[in-house]
Every structure is written in structure tokens, then in C-alpha cells.
Image (cartoon, grey):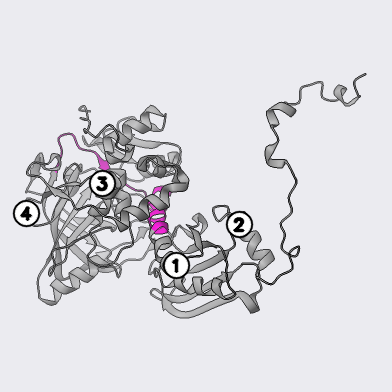
């Protein structure tokens, strides 16, 4: 494999400002596994990446005999995201929230590494090592590409991640859910025009995280990436359209979402751990592929930890900001792994008045259509520990008094229990009544438990443990 050149970053930059710098960081701490040449792109790349998920990132050499290596598992642990941002785990949401509220405009450059090589004759599967992940996936998918589109009226860009099926040499099937990309496309399609797009593969961790921010229409996530970097993100204009892309990315696929064109896409293994069904979907026609010298192809295994956490933690930050605007009592939020980091939201509040928990539930359900179940707890409950949240529901919740139920509301189209995305939502107010007697909900505690130095008072039992039962004289 050719030597992969390193990116230059400021000495004080967090590790996640550069993809290659991040891989160096993981390697130096024993969290980068190099997979020998020849791994099959069909299932085997995904199988190995899943086994290493949260323990090590994966670098696959010559996968399927392809000269471009595949990388996976870059952000498959919550603590790794904090490291990439250069903050303590407890400060991740505050740092992301600050970046979302204080974006930094990008800076356009004339020369970009992502355009070192330009292919105007396109054959996706020959030119790129695109894996097939799950057993019943309809084929090879691009899963870690940032799809960048442009508001046809204002010119403001949007950045998001969509599953992209390789349908032919120069066509991608795209699942567009009711978000900003679809809004831009519907406007151009109504005028009979295609929508210019770019799919950017191989991004630094901070730009990946920024793409998942929940912000209003016409807020460019590349500016949130700049805020996370601490300086303007360098971008370059595509060679075939007006989209601006991160200049230091590995690979850029330039194309157009075709007006009045739909083709079969799916099934595909999604984050709820089920397959997104096959249906008529939107289509991207690819006009060019550009890439670095010796690029890397990033893939996110459908339904794996990287898939869940990449969507979850940025959403937590923007959900926290959304709730705190209306409810100053909200202290923390957490999208639980058991709820696929999308559907189950735990909210910690410093309760001030009765009924507040229910209002927070309603605010959370309105914050994003993916939220399905909300549990509100007091500040003495650790919302990052599912056992504590379950304990609060078990001991502080009564269904006839504390349940909020909303029928026939918009939910996730990828939730198989809904009717094409329409279903019920539920909230649990598991907070202590303010007028409860002091001892009624007082948590038990052993004094001094946290101060015990276990190393000073205990040791592993040896073979003579029974002989030690007799008191020494």
C-alpha cells in the first residue's frame, strides 16, 4: 500500500481535526488494527469491523483486491468522541452545543487534496472499494458519506448522512427522509430541475459529528465543524457543480438528485437493527469522482456502534439546547443505547414545580420526530446508567398519574412498528412529588462507602484462605 501522507494541523488542535491525525492518535494508544490484504468486501469487512467495534478502529489493506484501503470504527465509543473534541466526556454536550450556537464560516481555497485525482468517466464499484454489510442488503452501500446539498434560493448548504445504494456504474439510490435535503430537492423538482449534490467520504471526526447536528433549515453544518475545529473549515468548489466540500476529505462523489426519477432501493440493515424495506427511492446520477493521492474509504457498518453513536451524541447536544431554551430546570439528556440512540430519551431535571416533568416530555417529543419514549427523572438519578433509570421508573412512576400518551404522531419511518412512520409516543414522569415526606423517597446510603481504599484493605484470596479463618493470636 502507498504511504498515506499526514495532514498538517495546529499544535493545539484537538485530535479529531484531521482524519489521518485521528488514526495516528488511535494507533499510538493501541486502538488501530491493520487487517491483512484480501478481506472480502461482501460481509467480511463488516464482520471484522463489528467484532472490533468500540475496541479498535479497523484499517483494511487491499480489501477485495482493491488498491484503496477501507477504514471503519473511527467513533465507536462515547469516550473516543470526547477525545476527538479534546474535552472531558462530561463536557461533550456543552462543547457541541457551543459550536452549534456559535458557528464559524468556512474558507474557500483554490487547491484541495480531495481533488488531486479527477475521474470524469465513472464506475463506482471499480473505482471505489464499497462494501456490502448485512446479510439481506440489496448490494454495496456508501454509508459514511456526507451528502451536501444547496438551497436553490439562498445558496446555503446542508450536510447530512444518507444510505446510498450503488445501483449501477454511475447511479446511487438514496433514502431521503423528511429533512432538509428533501426540502431542497422538492423545491428544485417542482421547477423540473435536478438538485446539485456531493457525497464526501473520508472526513475528519469533528466534521462527521457536525453533520449530525439538529439545526434549523439554512444552517450549514460545515460551519459547526469549523467551530469544533476552532478555525474556519477549508472548502473547495466541486469540479462539476457549485457545492463546496471539505478540502481535506479523502473522496468526493459529485452528482445530481434527478427530478421526477425514482428507482428501487433497499433492503438495507439500519440502526434499529432491522432492514429498511425495498421501495421506489430518489436517484443520484454521478458526474465525477475526485480524491486524494492514495485515499482511504470510510464505511460505517449499518446498525453497528459507530452508526448508533455518531447519530446519538450530536443529537443529545442539540436536544439539550432545545429543551433548556424552554425549561431551565433541564440538567442533562441521554439517548439510550437500548433505544438505538434515537428513540429513547432520558432527561434529568431539577424539578421546581408539579407538572414540569410532563411539560418537559411534551417538549422533548416535539424536539425531533425520532423521539418515541421519554423518561424524566430527578438529579439524583444517573441517566447514563440504564439500571438507575429503570429503578426510577419502578419506584417513582404510576401509570394512572405519570404517563403521557400521544397517538397518531409522526415518528421514524425506519421503526418497523409504525404505520409508515406514524405511531404513538409515550412519556414517563419518574420524578418525586415535591410534597412527598422527606424519608419517603430518600435513597439508602452506606456512609463512607465511596471513601474506602479497597487496595489498602483487601487482597486476592490465596490457596490458604481457609486457614486464615482462625483468628491470629
**Crowding near the residue tagged with mark 3, few <14, some 14–19, many ≥20 C-alpha atoms within 10 Å:** many
Q: State which tag comes first along the sequence, 4 or 1.
A: 4
Residue drawn at (41%, 29%) of the image: 29
Q: Residue furthest bottom?
A: 408
User: What is the CA distance from the residue labelled 2 to the residue labelled 3?
Assistant: 44 Å
User: What is the CA distance from the residue labelled 2 to the residue labelled 4?
Assistant: 53 Å
Which is more foreground, mark 1 or mark 2? Answer: 2
**Crowding near the residue tagged with mark 4, few <14, some 14–19, many ≥20 C-alpha atoms within 10 Å:** some
Residue marked by disc 2:
381
Residue marked by disc 4:
240
Which region of the structure is painted magenta? Answer: 291-317
Q: State which tag comes first along the sequence, 3 or 4.
A: 3
For the residue labelled by badge 3, is the local secondary structure a helix, a strand or a loop?
loop
Residue marked by disc 1:
371
Q: State which tag comes first along the sequence, 2 or 4.
A: 4
The image quadrant that residue 231 belongs to is top left
Residue drawn at (15%, 38%) of the image: 292
Instruction: Specify the quadrant that holds the C terminus.
Output: top right
Vertical side of 137 occupied by 427: above or below: below
User: Horizontal placement of 89 versus 283: left or right?
Assistant: right
Amino acid at each position: 500500500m502507498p504511504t498515506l501522507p499526514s495532514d498538517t494541523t495546529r499544535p493545539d488542535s484537538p485530535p479529531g481535526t484531521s482524519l489521518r491525525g485521528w488514526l495516528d492518535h488511535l494507533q499510538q494508544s493501541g486502538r488501530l488494527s491493520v487487517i491483512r490484504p484480501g478481506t472480502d468486501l461482501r460481509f467480511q469487512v463488516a464482520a471484522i469491523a463489528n467484532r472490533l467495534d468500540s475496541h479498535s478502529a479497523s484499517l483494511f489493506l487491499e480489501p477485495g483486491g482493491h488498491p484503496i484501503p477501507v477504514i471503519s470504527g473511527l467513533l465507536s465509543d462515547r469516550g473516543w468522541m470526547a477525545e476527538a473534541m479534546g474535552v472531558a466526556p462530561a463536557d461533550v454536550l456543552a462543547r457541541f452545543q457551543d459550536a452549534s450556537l456559535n458557528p464559524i464560516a468556512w474558507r474557500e481555497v483554490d487547491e484541495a487534496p480531495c481533488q488531486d485525482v479527477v475521474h470524469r468517466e465513472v464506475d463506482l464499484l471499480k473505482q471505489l472499494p464499497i462494501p456490502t454489510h448485512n446479510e439481506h442488503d440489496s448490494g454495496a452501500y456508501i454509508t459514511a458519506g456526507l451528502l451536501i446539498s444547496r438551497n436553490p434560493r439562498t445558496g446555503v448548504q446542508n450536510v447530512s448522512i444518507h444510505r446510498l445504494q450503488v445501483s449501477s456504474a454511475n447511479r446511487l439510490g438514496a433514502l431521503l427522509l423528511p429533512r432538509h435535503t428533501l426540502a431542497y430537492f422538492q423545491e428544485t423538482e417542482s421547477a423540473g430541475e435536478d438538485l446539485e449534490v456531493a457525497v464526501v467520504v473520508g472526513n475528519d471526526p469533528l466534521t462527521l459529528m457536525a453533520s449530525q447536528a439538529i439545526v434549523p433549515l439554512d444552517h450549514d453544518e460545515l460551519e459547526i465543524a469549523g467551530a469544533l475545529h476552532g478555525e474556519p473549515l477549508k472548502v473547495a468548489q466541486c469540479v462539476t457543480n457549485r457545492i463546496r466540500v471539505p478540502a481535506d476529505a479523502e473522496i468526493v462523489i459529485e452528482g445530481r438528485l434527478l427530478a421526477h426519477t425514482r428507482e428501487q432501493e433497499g433492503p438495507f440493515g439500519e440502526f434499529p437493527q432491522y432492514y429498511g424495506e425495498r421501495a421506489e427511492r430518489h436517484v443520484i446520477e454521478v458526474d465525477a469522482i475526485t480524491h486524494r493521492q492514495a485515499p482511504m474509504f470510510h464505511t460505517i457498518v449499518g446498525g453497528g456502534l459507530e452508526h448508533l453513536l455518531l447519530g446519538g451524541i450530536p443529537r443529545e447536544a442539540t436536544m439539550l439546547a432545545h429543551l433548556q431554551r424552554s425549561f431551565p430546570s433541564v440538567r442533562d439528556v441521554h439517548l439510550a443505547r437500548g433505544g438505538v440512540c434515537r428513540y429513547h430519551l432520558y432527561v434529568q431535571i431539577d424539578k421546581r414545580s408539579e407538572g414540569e416533568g410532563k411539560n418537559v416530555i411534551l417538549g422533548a417529543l416535539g424536539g425531533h420526530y425520532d423521539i418515541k419514549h421519554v423518561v424524566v427523572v430527578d438529579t439524583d438519578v444517573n441517566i447514563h446508567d440504564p439500571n438507575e433509570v429503570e429503578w426510577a421508573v419502578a419506584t417513582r412512576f404510576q401509570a394512572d398519574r405519570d404517563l403521557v400518551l400521544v397517538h397518531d404522531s409522526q415518528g421514524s419511518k425506519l421503526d418497523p412498528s409504525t404505520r409508515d412512520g406514524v405511531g404513538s409516543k409515550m412519556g414517563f414522569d419518574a420524578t418525586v412529588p415535591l410534597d412527598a415526606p422527606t424519608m419517603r423517597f430518600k435513597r439508602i446510603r452506606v456512609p463512607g462507602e465511596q471513601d474506602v481504599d479497597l487496595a489498602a484493605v483487601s487482597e486476592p484470596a490465596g490457596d490458604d484462605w481457609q486457614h486464615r479463618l482462625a483468628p491470629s493470636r
